[in-house]
Amino acid sequence: MTAHTPSSLPSLLAVFAHPDDESLVAGGVLAQHAAVGARTAVVTATWAPDSHRAAELADAVGILGAGKPRMLGYADARIPQSAPGQARFCDAPLDETVGRLVGHLREVRPEIVVTHDAYGNLTGHPDHVHTHRVTTLALQASGLEHLYPETGEPWQPNAVYLATHPHSGVGELGNLLTQVGKSVLSVPDARVTAAVDVSPWLAQKWAAILAHRSEVERTRALPGILSRLPADARQRIMSIEYYTRFDIKPTPGGLRQPAL
């Protein structure tokens, strides 16, 4: 992200667990990329496409310029009614979930992918953690021609950016989460490779968060917590998005002697 000039930002696919994760975690980066004409899209693992959360998601990704929602339609680990008759995302066959995400990767053909870190971001929600696992496997499988051939031609992004928080960047948000009984799982500062100032797109990011109306109404949900803050405190919390980058594509050059 930071290695590109504003006029040459790469195409981006965001893969997150729930409707609202895309806006809370990467809303600024999605808006930033869309603003300069880079292709962006969002895959959401849970909630049924005919649910009220899906309608809110459609509004949010529209605000962020990320097209139409791409929903896998599994049930939230803690809310079975989020997708009646469907398996919880955490319980669905791994080969199935990886294959479905490979299909989106090969269709969108992004240069970079953004998803949850191995902790599942600060709160460690099981759906966040599982989305990280499934995305990591799909990123490898998507580039191999003999895996899931029915989903299209192989494609492998250049890099994945894992959304995270450094210890030094938790600040006020950490206190707000602990007050409602949530975990705060940050990483050492040295693990963060990109701290993106999204201030120019903050109004757009906030509008996308507010589009998740049912979450704004909830006391313990982060959209609701943020909505009750003074504007200056909310701006401090939302203005920087943190990521750890991992390169995916092999280094060109063919077979080499092992350096062991």
Image (cartoon, rainbow, N blue to C red):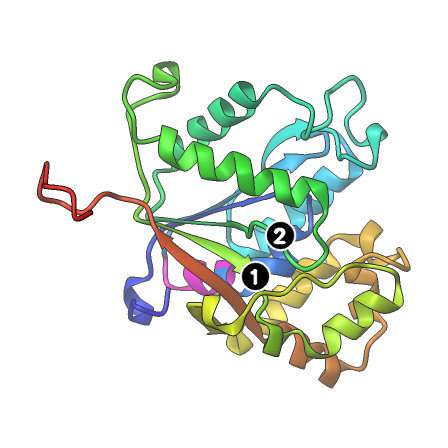
Q: Position of residue 192 (x, y in %)?
A: 47, 68
Mark 1 and mark 2 residues within 8 Å of each other at the beta carbon:
yes
Q: Position of residue 8 (x, y in %)?
A: 28, 63
Task: Mark 1 vs mark 2: give the one in front.
Answer: 2
Magenta span dominant secondary structure: helix
Q: Amino acid at mark 2?
A: Tyr
Is residue 43 visible in the rendered image? The answer is no
Is residue 18 visible in the rendered image? The answer is yes
227 on left or right of 8: right
- Magenta-colored span: 30-37
Which residue ends up furthest to the bottom in the rendered image?
232
Quarter of the image that includes the N terminus: bottom left
Q: Position of residue 179 (x, y in %)?
A: 88, 68
The residue under the point 75% across, 41% down is: 53
Foreground residue, 88 or 183?
183
Is 35 part of what is drawn in magenta?
Answer: yes
Instruction: Tell me the crowding category of disc 2: few under 14, some 14 to 19, or many 20 or more residues within 10 angstroms, Cα based.
Output: many
